[in-house]
Image: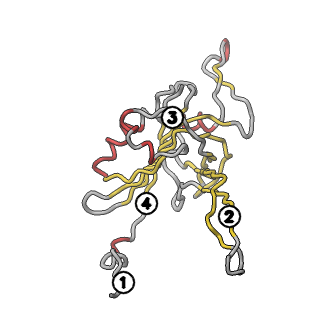
Amino acid sequence: MALVPKNSTTARLSKNLSREGRQVFVSPLSAVGDIAVTDWVDLGLFPPGEKVSPTNNVTREPIRAQDPAGGPDLLLVEDVTDVTAVYDNIPVLTPDEYVRRLHLGSAPTAMTGDLTGATISPFDPGASILARMILVRRHKASGDPVYKVYWHPRVALQNNGEGDNQNKETVQFRVPVQSFTGELSDALDAYAPSISPLGAIFSVPASKLDALLDILKAEAPAA
């Protein structure tokens, strides 16, 4: 019997071609000026062509055995010994005052006296702001398209300098994903086996996106 792929009638349709739009929300786990620990900040718009996706690095250790027939060693399995994920660069084309505060890379301290209204932050390359993060990846399609939502209960927002795009300034973030081993709410506890310490990827119909974000905005709050 011939091999007939499950998607034989759809795999090569031109309507599958699409561009994705990405939106990133972050919530610091300590107050940053008037950004409270329960607030979420939209990072804004990104330059054309920016994918805004994590780079995953996986270290594997091969487990081998002798070939009983005397040939080369047999590969039985590869153990995963280390996993890291990082958003190497998130350039923001439209940073507002809240995004610029987060871009400092450390929580500012309010100044007093003649400098009331000003803040001071250390110039400390490599410093970070612990936060939660949600990445929404949308694409246009008829009906009720399925969107991807990346949820990271813990990330480190780091100042990655400034850039230039189309002769406009961008502020750039580097965002390593950190592990979270805290408790999940009742809304997600049933799905705990599908959630890793680094978070989860949801595939959600567009019509259910707001309901999912309503759950995720309250997950993994500051201790």
Q: Secondary structure at mark 2?
A: strand
- Tell me the residue that label 1 is attached to: 3
Q: Residue at x 62, y 46 (%)?
A: 176
Q: Which residue is mark 4?
A: 20
The answer to whether any part of residue 22 appears in the image is: yes
Residue 143 place in picture, x, y as percent: 24, 60
Label 2 CA crowd tier, 10 Å (few <14, some 14–19, many 20+): few
In the picture provided, is 195 more to the left or to the right than 180?
left
Q: Alpha-carbon neighbours of circle 1 within 10 Å: few (<14), some, or many (≥20)?
A: few
Task: Inspect the image, locate mark 1, and give the three-letter code of the amino acid beneath it.
Answer: Leu
Which three-letter amino acid code belongs to the residue tagged 2?
Pro
Instruction: Count neighbours of disc 3 (C-alpha within 10 A) and say few if under 14, some if 14 to 19, many if 20 or more.
Output: many
Query: Which mark is in front, 4 or 2?
Result: 2
Q: Earlier in the sequence, mark 3 or mark 4?
A: 4
Residue 120 in percent (x, y) is at: 68, 25
Q: Is residue 7 above or below residue 117?
A: below
Look at the picture and state if 68 lies above or below 83: below
In which quarter of the view is residue 64 placed?
bottom right
Circle 2 sits on which residue? 62
Whole-Å distance between the Cαs marked 4 and 2?
37 Å
The residues tagged by marks 2 and 1 sit, at their Cα atoms, a distance apart of: 33 Å
Please give the name of the residue rendered at 33% of the width and 79% of the height, measured from the top-left corner: 8
CA–CA distance in space, label 1 to label 3: 49 Å
Q: Nearer the viewer, mark 2 or mark 1?
A: 2
Task: For marks 1 and 4, give the CA distance.
Answer: 32 Å
Q: Residue at x 74, y 39 (%)?
A: 125
In this view, the mark in front (1 or 3): 1
Residue type (three-letter) at the residue carrying disc 4: Glu
